[in-house]
Image (cartoon, coloured by chain):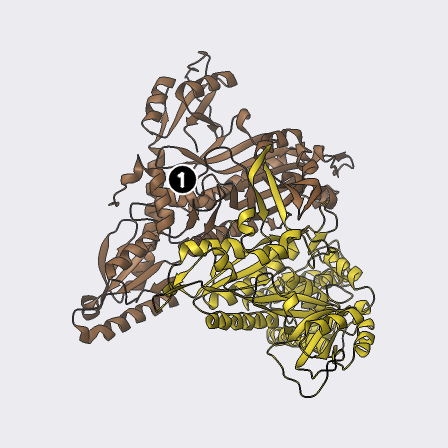
Chain colours: A yellow, B brown
Amino acid sequence: MIRPKKSRLISSFSEWFDSVLRKAEVYDYGRYPVKGMGVWLPYGFQIRKKIIEKIRDLLDETSHEEVLFPLLIPDWMLKKEGEHIRGFEDEVYWITHGGLEELDQKLALRPTSETIITYYESLWYQSYRQLPKKLYQIVSMFRYETKATRALIRLREVTTFKEAHTLHENYYDAERQAREAIEIYKEFFDTLKIPYLISKRPDWDKFAGALYTIAFDTLLPDGKTLQIGTVHHLGQSFPKAFNFKIQLKDGSYDHPWQTSYGISDRVLATLIAIHGDDNGLVLPPSIAPLQVVVVPIIPSNKGIKGDVNKYAIVIVDELNKNGIKVKLDDREDMTPGEKYYYWDSKGVPLRIEIGEREFRENTATIVRRDTLEKRVVNREGLIEEVKVTMKMISQNLYDTAWENMKKRIHRVDTPEEAKQLLNKKEGIVEIPWCGREECALKIMDSIDAKSLGTPWPSEKINGGKCPICGRHAVTVMRYARQY
Amino acid sequence: MIRPKKSRLISSFSEWFDSVLRKAEVYDYGRYPVKGMGVWLPYGFQIRKKIIEKIRDLLDETSHEEVLFPLLIPDWMLKKEGEHIRGFEDEVYWITHGGLEELDQKLALRPTSETIITYYESLWYQSYRQLPKKLYQIVSMFRYETKATRALIRLREVTTFKEAHTLHENYYDAERQAREAIEIYKEFFDTLKIPYLISKRPDWDKFAGALYTIAFDTLLPDGKTLQIGTVHHLGQSFPKAFNFKIQLKDGSYDHPWQTSYGISDRVLATLIAIHGDDNGLVLPPSIAPLQVVVVPIIPSNKGIKGDVNKYAIVIVDELNKNGIKVKLDDREDMTPGEKYYYWDSKGVPLRIEIGEREFRENTATIVRRDTLEKRVVNREGLIEEVKVTMKMISQNLYDTAWENMKKRIHRVDTPEEAKQLLNKKEGIVEIPWCGREECALKIMDSIDAKSLGTPWPSEKINGGKCPICGRHAVTVMRYARQY
């Protein structure tokens, strides 16, 4: 498959990324006097809306109920669960004043909502008969990040935080729920043609307060991984902290069990980073606010200008009637070349050019955004051709993205090999692991990378030794340079 | 038209209102340890979503573009426009700390977004050619209210703030935009069957920083008015404060002109307050998340239980196929009476009861939520009957609500008459006015009410004298007890 040039792939990813956001008018970043915050521009907002619709559909179909909890959480509530607040206390924005008065309790901007939701669950649910309960909200979330901020990847105001919170009568039901969440995220990322690697995070890197965390990571073109989704089995820690019990089937009382799982603006960052090229965005047709743009080309023979335009309008109408999101670009103050550049940068999957020749020969020229391939097709078969080509674009984006990721996952035996690969921006390495934290930490140090965790579902390996202690390896640990 | 009992109308409105929110599971309020904030529950969230879809459609159709600006605004930016900050400084929540560090600039939670939007507009627009520009966002907004808070009516976290902001090359274009905004809001409130009175707010009560404010007020059952929408002609004050100029057609430079207009959670409060009755919510069919509930009644002759259920399911399927949002309530652990109570409280417009008689006679019993009228209809005409009845419900809600408001607007000549009416919770009074602030203020004092403003569009009156100074009246001023 021919693909346009991707000169950015290695060296200048972050510069390229920022320029695409700007050129495609997705998100205005870096010009606000508060670090880590930006503006969703109209076009970016429409893409974001499409993505939100997808995840909302998937959650609604699986009996999740959408709700909206307050943004402001009093300090004592956020601090109820000790491990949790230790994980977040450096990152919380605190409100101390209302008007000119000092507040009698400090209020946090939600960094996540486990505490406030457990507080309400303890008011709402008394019996196993009311469970399981699956709630979710799509909200802004705030973290006073100490690491370098970056548009859509590490923000201080995360504007598209989808957090789900579920409540169960026992451990196993919560575990079953975590698996459902993983399936939902797989389907979600598949829709967006985003490849992922699912890992069980090591204990030293799980969510603050959780029994365990399963994470989705993807690989960006610069060889660094990005965490794009997490699923936590929370055990009973929050209900314990809130002294929240329910009556079980046998009449006894116990703390219920929880899971939580979230995704963020990083989904859109990934969509851009993985599919985009030197010309700008490349959007999967199912997410594109606009799927086809029709550009009439003013013929040298001015006499038939009206005919060419009419021919283009008829095509637009027909596409429209067939449920395709299409727009006619008949602006008079731009050349066709300028229009191509404009729509290419916005990632519109298909362009149809209509000129004198197309009009006379009863054809249309269609251009694929992903491969930039150009083809002349007959007028009669156009609708079918557009539909088929959109499917091919989806498949191509999916295949290419997965292929690019898979070929940069390497199973190696030693930290030395691993380090060489990582230095060449070669993605993710898997090294046999004995299961002991100290060995993994030593490897992280020596290869200058972070641990992603062990494969999920878990994978037993035959043979292989921990390169640090020489013990028999029980699994592999994944390492990568991470965002 | 028969209407169910509305014992709440006079004395216990606020108690009734809170109980409806609770019973219908709309919004959990009053149990959060931070005043003025609550939780949108799943059912309430669905109604809210419908309302958001309506306003979004109306704005998108009129070339407004949806965007999302940061929630946090640095203090110096919020303070740029002097009048504006004086209007808000007692009501702003301030963030002073990130983690354990003190921030080097205080950050406000948006009380409204004129300042931040003007800041960005000054980066984006340079020429009249880019105008007009109409942006909007649907966000949370925060006010540290000093008045008594109340669910959905006076909140500290307003979660459904739709704010539109527009930019124009001259005064008249901005004025035209304000008129467009008024038309949009009229259509919006008409869809919700919410009656309104449009007034030009007096100068002493306009939006902080505006040239003038046009407001939509409605009348709640307890005789108090509630401001449900405002439209501001902002003039050039914000662009002046930000030193923001654009190039005009003649090549010269000037500050552009702005309008802004907003609605809030109060829309839902009004929907509940105006249409609801002693049984709970009454929703207009166009807003109801569920339009019809079908309740099968287990026959005394157990042998045909399966047949009755099947008959009900076929009816549900058929309604569904006809685009009606319908649900079968076949819960086994509730009596039909309990189900009626449950769905009535949630305001589902139509109930269909299917029992042995309906099955044998090939009929269905339909019950209107608004009038509680019951009717048996033939199976063949059921779909048509449901559609027609939903239209009748819409019309009845509209007519009743407007009638209730109109009959409580009184034109009187003296403060004494006005006070008598207001004391009887008789709504809104209009008193001839000479146009001088001091006279209106004296009347407000003497009748213990606030001024809503003068009629919009403006209304000249013939005859009539200002009851305070005796001068010839130029118009009427409206007064009411207000939320």
Q: What residue is shown at x 48% (from left), y 59% (from top)?
A: A239
Q: Chain of mark 1?
A: B
Task: Inspect this view and state whether residue A87 appears.
Answer: yes
- Disc 1: CA contacts within 10 A as few (<14), some (14-19) or many (>=20): many
Q: Quadrant of residue A459?
A: bottom right
Q: Residue A400 or B103: which is nearer the viewer?
A: B103
Question: Is the residue B220 above or below the residue A278 in the image?
Answer: above
Residue A467: image location, x then y, percent: 76, 80
Total of numbered circles in the picture? 1
Q: Is residue A95 left or right of residue A2?
A: left
Residue B9: image location, x then y, percent: 30, 37
Residue A440: image location, x then y, percent: 72, 73
- Kind of residue indicated by mark 1: Pro
Q: Quadrant of residue B248?
A: top right
Q: Residue A235 or B16: which is nearer the viewer?
A: A235
Task: Inspect this view and state whether residue A308 appears.
Answer: no
Q: Residue furthest top?
A: B470
Which image quarter holds the C terminus of chain B?
Answer: top left
Q: Residue furthest left?
A: B301
Q: Residue B130 or A13: which is nearer the viewer?
A: A13
Q: Residue B373 or A292: which is nearer the viewer?
A: B373
Q: Is residue A142 left or right of residue B223?
A: right
Q: Secondary structure at mark 1?
A: loop
Question: Is the residue A271 above or below the residue B282 in the image?
Answer: below
Which image quarter holds the N terminus of chain B?
Answer: top left
Can you identify the residue that label 1 sits on? B195
Question: Is the residue B313 above or below the residue B393 in the image?
Answer: below
Residue B209: image location, x then y, percent: 62, 31
Question: Is the residue A255 above or below the residue A429 in the image?
Answer: above
